[in-house]
Amino acid sequence: MLDIAGISKSFGGSQVLNGVSLHLRAGDRLGLTGSNGSGKSTLVNIVTGYIEADAGRVTLDTVDLTNRPAWKIARAGIRRSFQSARMLQSATMRHQFRVEMNTTTQGLAAIDAAGLSPYLDHFPSEVPLPILRKAEVVRALVTEPKVLFLDEPSAGFTSEELIEFADFLNAHLSRSTALVLVEHRIDLMRRVATGIKQIGSARSLEDLEFEHA
Amino acid sequence: MSVYVASILTNMALISFLALSAYLVLVVGVVSFGQQAFFGVGAYVTATVTSIYGGHAVTGVFIGMLSGAACALVLAILTARLSGLYFAISTLCFAELCRLGLLQVRAPFNIDGRTTGPDGPEGFSNIRWIFEHNYSVQDFLVLTTVCLVALLGLLFLLERSRIMLRARLVGQDSILAQSLGLRPILYRIVFVTLSGGVAGFGGGLFALFNTYIEPNMFGVMLGVHGLAYAVIGGLGAPIGPLIGVAIDIGLLESIRAISAYRMIAFGGLVALLLILLPQGLISPRFVERMRRWRKLFHA
């Protein structure tokens, strides 16, 4: 489905990514890790159209999406979240989902499960972070994306919140969606991911051994 | 109602069109210093249609509106790749280009023994449609108010739609908007074009009401005022810019004692409001809060 082939990127003189390749199929749950500055976010930004790659190709179901604009990639079915929960700050939570769909239909169950129901008339700044993170996932899931990138969704979570978030993902991700979890916290990845890769010293992806929870 | 009061109210209604056009541009997250150009184009086109070609005022204003929108569309496409500051400068340049261009257009016509048509800095005189059709100042106030209320109605419908929500998202967080599949440029082009239409419509009415127009009426200060009304009024609802107009013209210009100091008072007020309420009087949050309270009352 999603094919990332030989992605390279350097900023100034420093090579951040060097021939990163990755293949994702529907239903894959991949954890992506690496030390700070290793290029995880750069990879996500390239695949989702926010940064142009120096070399390499991104294809989704034979459609070439390399260096396409972000909105086109989103429409093609690759969705993402950002490191800081991004919402339309001037609108209440109810309206966040109106951008994509009618809250009266398919989204209601997921919204309820995310614990959002009491917050529908609240502004994003008044909603607790774990619920906001789930809201981001809901916002993406209602479009039934083919690939979903979550960029450090657990930042700022307590252990309990992390377990809750993992359960939420496991319960609501459909089998047709491939998930890429960009994370530092191995405990979240162990609960959700079926495989973990890291960006190592060679600036490309390598498999990481891990024990499934 | 005295002619004096009616003409002040009409002027308030007319400048409201300009303020609403500035509002539509601000919603998508850019600032325009050039809305006066679309207002001026609407005025000149309406004057041409009614005075030279003998068209009906409705036809004139309609074509004026389309001309304003067409100019805005061209500007929006030309500036599609420019970010905030550069867009703002471009709109200013475009408006000045229009004004200076109109100063060069000398095509006076002699119609029924009267000189009309654009005549450079001498302006476009004898726009006599409302005289010829026996509209009093009070009648014209009613007409303008009806048009303004109709426009507000349309904007409220737009406000409730998903299009407006998406436009606001593009305006506030373009990065997020793109990640949701929204194409920011498209929203900017559509809303700038709409704003040109609104300004052109208001300009058309202005020409009919004023019966005389000249390029220097559509200078930078007009645009800056329209923009300031939208900024202090806030981006929460279309009523915001109208409150801005009411404060400046209704309060400051109309009260004789302070009208001489209007610019100082208004400038100071804008500065003060931007410090105290950077989102304007009717901010999006304010509107949401009102909705929440209304719900509490109904519950």
Image (spheres, helix red, strand yellow):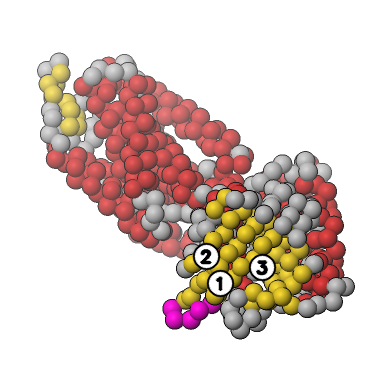
Q: Position of residue A76 (x, y in %)?
A: 60, 49
Task: Name the residue nearer the viewer: B137 or B5.
Answer: B137
Q: Position of residue A22 (x, y in %)?
A: 64, 66
Q: Is residue B172 left or right of residue A176?
A: left
* Label drawn at residue A151: 3
Alpha carbons under labels 2 and 1: distance apart: 7 Å
Of labels 2 and 1, earlier in sequence is 1
Q: In which quadrant is the N terminus of chain B drawn?
A: top left
Of labels 2 and 3, earlier in sequence is 2
Q: Position of residue B128 (x, y in %)?
A: 25, 22
Q: Is residue B25 magenta?
A: no
Q: Is residue B126 left or right of residue B68?
A: left
Question: The residue marked by circle 1 belongs to what chain?
Answer: A
Q: Is residue B179 above or below residue B99?
A: below
The amino acid at mark 2 is Gly
Q: Which residues are magenta?
A: A12-16
Look at mark 1 in the image and give the residue it sits on.
Answer: A19
Q: Residue at x 12, y 28 (%)?
A: B108
The amino acid at mark 1 is Gly
Q: Residue at x 23, y 35 (%)?
A: B213
Alpha carbons under labels 2 and 3: distance apart: 21 Å
Q: Residue at x 84, y 76 (%)?
A: A211
Q: Residue at x 57, y 59 (%)?
A: A58
Q: Position of residue B39 (x, y in %)?
A: 33, 39
10 Å crowding of disc 1: few (<14), some (14-19), many (20+): some
User: Same chain, marks 1 and 3?
Assistant: yes
Q: Is residue A14 magenta?
A: yes
The amino acid at mark 3 is Asp
